[in-house]
Image (cartoon, grey):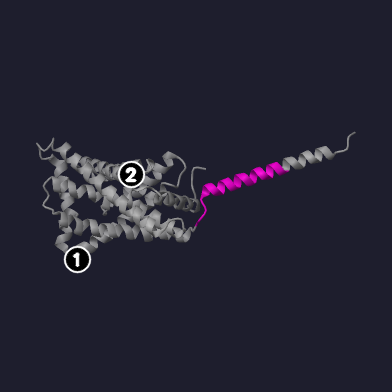
Amino acid sequence: MDYVSPKELLQEAVQLAKRKSELSRRDMLIRGILAGALLGYATSLAIIVTSQGLPPIVGAILFPVGFVMLVLLGLELVTGNFALLPAGVLAGKVRVTQLLRNWGWVYLGNLIGSVLYAALFYLAITNWRTGNGGAVAELLKQAAQKKTLAYVSLGASGWASAVVKAVLCNWMVTIGAVLALASRSTVGKIAAMWLPIMTFFALGFEHSVVNMFVIPSGMMLGAPISIGQGLFWNLLPVTIGNIVAGTLLTGIALYATYPTETAPVIKQVQEFATGQDKQETAFATAVKSRVNQPSA
């Protein structure tokens, strides 16, 4: 069957978390950088579509392409790991130190990849700094200011608002990361991931890795945002909200209702071995019975 039941899905999620926790720093950085860049591609695609006069929902429908590509390539996105690694810890497959190690290096990789893509995208839309970037640049600057200066103007309420929007965002993103395991076919995985990722982007919630592209891009294009404002009024509260949602609302919540320690692969091997044993026993009994039959 193509469909993977929730119980089996969590079993596979735990095994995936274990593999992620054992990655070398080099692999976490490389895969994190690539994931950050791919998410930057998807975000810029959505912005370009919007700049052409199409409704924002069209950009939201297209945005999941970046998430799909990075998941199918086995890359590292820290917001998805905010759910997978805690499930591994609860199952006893991942140590807390491994969880923190993974989150730290992948977060750094995502940041590097996002800023790198932002710089290249800036050079592309400004024709190597000879133009102003047109409508795309204006939308990026507006988005960057909305994600920082708008919160600054609200003070503590703005900071709290960023946290809440980040919680609502990563609840959907981590559901997408888990649903990537809900099918055994590539098409099924894509369809399952697409739904929650499209939902979060259409609602305009706050995703830390997306913002690692949007805010630096806006700053490069002239938005009056300081590095301190970008970090304190967006990345800090948004990262906190993303962690809360991924850890509590997806990782721990799903593991609590579908606790597991055994990987489905192991289970399938055991069932296959048991089936073989039964066949061999039946064959041996039939042969023995045939031999013991009296001759005519």
Residue at left 79%, top 40%? 288
**For mark 2, what is the residue?**
31
Q: Quadrant of the C terminus?
A: top right
Helix, strand or loop under label 2: helix
Q: Is residue 52 visible?
A: no
Helix, strand or loop under label 1: helix
CB-based contact (under 8 Å), mark 1 and mark 2? no
Q: Is residue 56 above or below residue 260?
A: above
Residue at left 43%, top 56%? 94
Which residue type does callout 2 highlight? Arg
Horizontally, residue 47 falls left or right of residue 94, namely left
**For mark 1, what is the residue?**
156
Residue 98 belongs to magenta span: no
Of the two numbered discs 1 and 2 on the same chain, state the one appearing first in sequence: 2
Mark 2 burial class by Cα count in 10 Å: few <14, some 14-19, many 20+: many
Residue 90 vs residue 167, the one in the foreground: 90
Query: For the magenta stretch, what is the residue range?
Result: 260-281
- The percent position of residue 290, horizontal first and vertical second, equals 81, 38
- The percent position of residue 17, horizontal first and vertical second, equals 42, 52
Q: Is residue 280 visible?
A: yes
- The percent position of residue 86, horizontal first and vertical second, equals 40, 58
Which residue type does callout 1 highlight? Ala
Residue 269 belongs to magenta span: yes
- Determine the residue located farthest toward the right in the rendered image: 296
- Determine the residue located farthest toward the top in the rendered image: 296
Residue 105 vs residue 140, the one in the foreground: 105
